[in-house]
Image (spheres, rainbow, N blue to C red):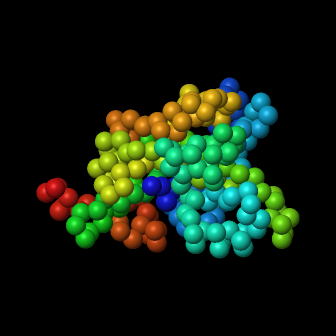
């Protein structure tokens, strides 16, 4: 799954997508937990163009009218991620998958390897992010107006797929990974496409050869330097 994400854009720059460039503000959020239920930058299609927007990480159902009601809803179902294989079968996800697809920005995400009773956190990124600072994860979103405050906002889920060979070794319990999209598929994902094509792209496996991963501190969530590599000698014996 993908419950911890990071974005490291060192300075205000331009992001080019579908032959258009938009201003991308500098972001320095090395690690954010989805369980904070906070805002995260996504790309939404808009008419014939697209926009960057801060959205609530956790897809809210259209029938949930307030953030207070969502706090009760999440006790029953976790919507930080949406499973690609069931995307078009789910009452909660289907309409968003068909009509409201987005891209979730990332510079790297975090996952745990389980060995016996021990866990070994990893930081995972792509070669694209190392060159251009961000890459795209497939997402779906809903638009809302909070019935208590009148605030307008979007909420989203990150789409996950079956792990590639690298992620299968790291996320060795559920063997999942976010659906990371290269530029052509990212552009297609936020365009008008058929249901069959949505299902195909949602299950896309980003190649392991284009990704990098290393072990980090078990305390990375509270560390001043969560991306610092940490060696666990015992893993060399596995």
The residue at 74%/60% (across/down) is 63
The residue at 77%/38% (across/down) is 46
- Tally the numbered discs: 0
Please tell me which residue lies in front, 37 or 65: 65
Query: Is residue 227 in sight in this rendering?
Result: yes
Please tell me which residue lies in front, 24 or 10: 24
Residue 111 in the image: state x and y as whole percent.
Answer: 39, 57
Residue 214 in the image: state x and y as whole percent.
Answer: 33, 53
Q: Pick out the residue farthest to the left.
A: 237
Which quarter of the rendering shows the N terminus? bottom left
Q: Based on the displayed image, in which of its 4 quarters is residue 70 positioned?
A: bottom right
The residue at 20%/58% (across/down) is 235
User: 97 above or below 216?
Assistant: above
User: 226 above or below 168?
Assistant: below
In the image, taking residue 116 as reference, residue 124 lies left or right, namely right
Please tell me which residue lies in front, 186 or 85: 85
In the image, taking residue 151 as reference, residue 210 lies left or right, namely left
Residue 17 in the image: state x and y as whole percent.
Answer: 65, 32
Q: Based on the displayed image, in which of its 4 quarters is residue 65 positioned?
A: bottom right
Query: Is residue 130 in sight in this rendering?
Result: no
Residue 223 in the image: state x and y as whole percent.
Answer: 44, 69
User: 69 above or below 79?
Assistant: below
In the image, taking residue 102 as reference, residue 120 lies left or right, namely left
The residue at 43%/63% (across/down) is 226
């Amino acid at each position: 799954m993908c419950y911890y994400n990071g974005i490291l854009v060192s300075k205000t720059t331009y992001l080019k997508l579908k032959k258009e460039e938009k201003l991308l503000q500098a972001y320095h959020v090395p690690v954010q937990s989805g369980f904070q239920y906070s805002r995260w930058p996504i790309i939404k299609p808009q008419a014939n163009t697209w926009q960057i927007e801060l959205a609530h990480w956790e897809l809210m159902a259209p029938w949930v009218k307030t953030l207070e009601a969502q706090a009760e809803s999440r006790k029953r179902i976790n919507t930080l991620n949406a499973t690609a294989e069931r995307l078009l079968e789910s009452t909660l996800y289907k309409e968003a998958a068909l009509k409201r697809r987005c891209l979730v920005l990332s510079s790297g995400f975090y996952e745990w390897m389980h060995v016996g009773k021990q866990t070994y956190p990893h930081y995972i990124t792509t070669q694209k992010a190392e060159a251009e600072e961000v890459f795209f994860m497939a997402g779906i979103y809903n638009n809302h107006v909070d019935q208590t405050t009148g605030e307008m906002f979007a909420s989203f889920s990150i789409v996950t797929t079956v792990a590639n060979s690298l992620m299968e070794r790291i996320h060795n319990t559920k063997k999942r990974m976010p659906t990371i999209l290269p530029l052509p598929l990212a552009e297609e994902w936020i365009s008008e496409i058929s249901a069959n094509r949505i299902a195909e792209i949602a299950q896309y496996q980003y190649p392991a050869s284009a990704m990098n991963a290393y072990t980090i501190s078990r305390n990375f969530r509270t560390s001043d330097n969560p991306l610092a590599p940490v060696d666990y000698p015992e893993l060399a014996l596995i």
